Amino acid sequence: MVRFRRTARATPERPAVIGPDGTLDFAELDARTADLAARLRALGIGRGDRVGVSLRRGVDWVTAPLAVWRAGAAYVPLDPAYPHQRLGELAADADLRALVSDDAAPGWLSGVPVLAPGAPGGTGGTGASPLAPVEPTALDPAYVIFTSGSTGRPKGVEVGRGAVAALVDGLERRGVYPAGPRVVAWNASMSFDASVQQWVRVCRGDTLVVLDDEDRTDPHRLAALLAEHEVTDLDLTPSHWDALAAGLLPGTAPRRGLRLLIGGEPIPPRMWRTLAEAGAEGRIEAFNLYGPTEATVDATAARVEGDGPHLGEPLPQVRAYVLDGALRPAPDGTAGELHLAGPGLALGYAGRPALTAERFVADPFAADGSRMYRTGDLVRRGAGGALEFLGRTDRQVKVRGFRVELGEIEAALRSCAGVAAAVVTVRQVAGEPALVAHYVPATGAALTADGLREHTAAALPGHLVPSAFVALDALPTTVNGKVDLRALPEPEAATDRSGPGPDAPGGEIEELIAGVWSEVLGRDGIRPDDDFFALGGHSLVALRVVARLRKRLGIVLPTKDIYRHPRLRDLAEHAAALRDGRTA
């Protein structure tokens, strides 16, 4: 906050945040955060308290967390797109003192005051007496972000103010954040920790450009927006970059280069080589960033260059140990579990002392009694000292950059009446990882894939809903009685069919779109009444649909149109209207 206030005084008229709903300069953002902070303080909120933030993408995505910090509290992002059941459980788990929301009366919350982010309060920045500054310590909580939980209950990772400061310091000293003001695209959802390293850059004087969902998922629209605002830094996952690269990777060195900060999942070797080649030619810059939420977003960084993927070396102030099962250092080139230590460690899991003690253990290599975090990631240290990612020691997976505990999805499935047993795995579907649920119906239960999808979607965020559901008479087991994951059958195109429907598409455009869906979803027998998302489609696959229809039909179809017309027949009718120049 000290750096932010200093920037606001030094360059009050420079843009601080540009969103789909307007622009705020640093003076306006300073006043807006002071006003909201004063209203929070008037409710008695201060150090150690937690304030929920549930907002649509816009300039107040920056206002709200800054104001919560200014009041001395910690913010808890609650994505309004999540199911109400999920939001209610997270809010109860976080023990909120207040909620900042553009919905005055959210149906999933009761007994907690709700504040609008931009409502005039007559204090702080509006002419009344200035807000008394709060002087937090490094151990005061900054935010709580919930991650998937293996037992079916999400866990809230509570991160301190000092850890955020260590993150910014480490990225600056490593050169990931260059000196001087930058223009940074805020891409990640506030509910994911990657958002922290994006939005907190406003505190160092960078301008934030908040991307809405259409910006994020429409390659042509995104390219135009990045050019319009002269964006210099874009943070995204490898999966997201794969869908956008054709429209954003220039063929020659541009006047204004784009720096990619890539993280959330391993960079595939081919993508690494392409980016390294583009970097050597001056067409783009790219950094590979790695770190769990429990280590405050990033723990290592590597410039994307050379032959193959690696995690690079620890950021300044981060201690990285590669240890065997007895917590002894593994020799270079030998696999071991990565343990992280330093001021960037989270405080722990909110309200979960036992789990905190299990994952955050004493650092045997430090004399100051500090802790280290067991990441569960298998790595090895290469000859040059760079860390190389090898896999996991448990069932936690990454799908399109989302951290997923398969046990949480299995618990949601087992809570559905009529499900006797269930197991969820990650399988390759249409060339990319997807969640697949295998389940055993109870005797006499009439279960359908649509019903199971509806049940899980009511309890879990969209990225945790399986793409396919496979019914089995029994789960295969090994000789020791455990589920034999390797023996689970692959999902087939007809697995999750239910209900009557036409057998085949009709008409040129319907057949063409069905063919594209079949290619990108890895399914045969697409029907006119099929729903793109029910067949396993998601935002990144939708980008591929848009690109192929543009090439084959010659029409520019915004990605949002697939959300508006998810059924094949409806999308075909809409595409025909666009091609013929009729109002769609």
Image (spheres, rainbow, N blue to C red):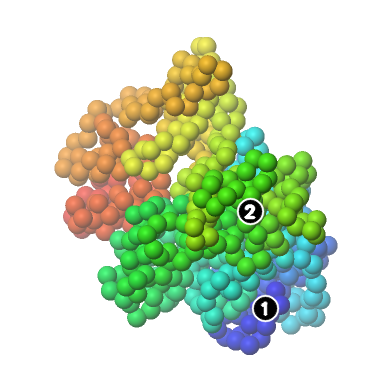
Sequence-wise first label, 1 or 2? 1
Marks 1/2: CA–CA distance: 32 Å
Name the quadrant of the C terminus: bottom left
- Which residue is under mark 1? 3
Residue 429 screen position, x and y as percent: 36, 38
Residue 229, x across and y down, in percent? 43, 76
Q: Residue at x 53, y 63 (%)?
A: 301
> Which residue bears the numbered disc 2?
321
Q: Using residue 344 as the reference point, say whether residue 219 is left or right of it.
A: left
Picture layout, residue 303 above or below residue 54: below
Residue ranking furthest to the bottom: 10
Residue 52 visible in the displayed image: no
Say which quadrant the N terminus sits in: bottom right
Q: Position of residue 430 (x, y in %)?
A: 33, 40
* Residue 86, quarter of the rendered image: top right
Type of amino acid under label 2: Tyr
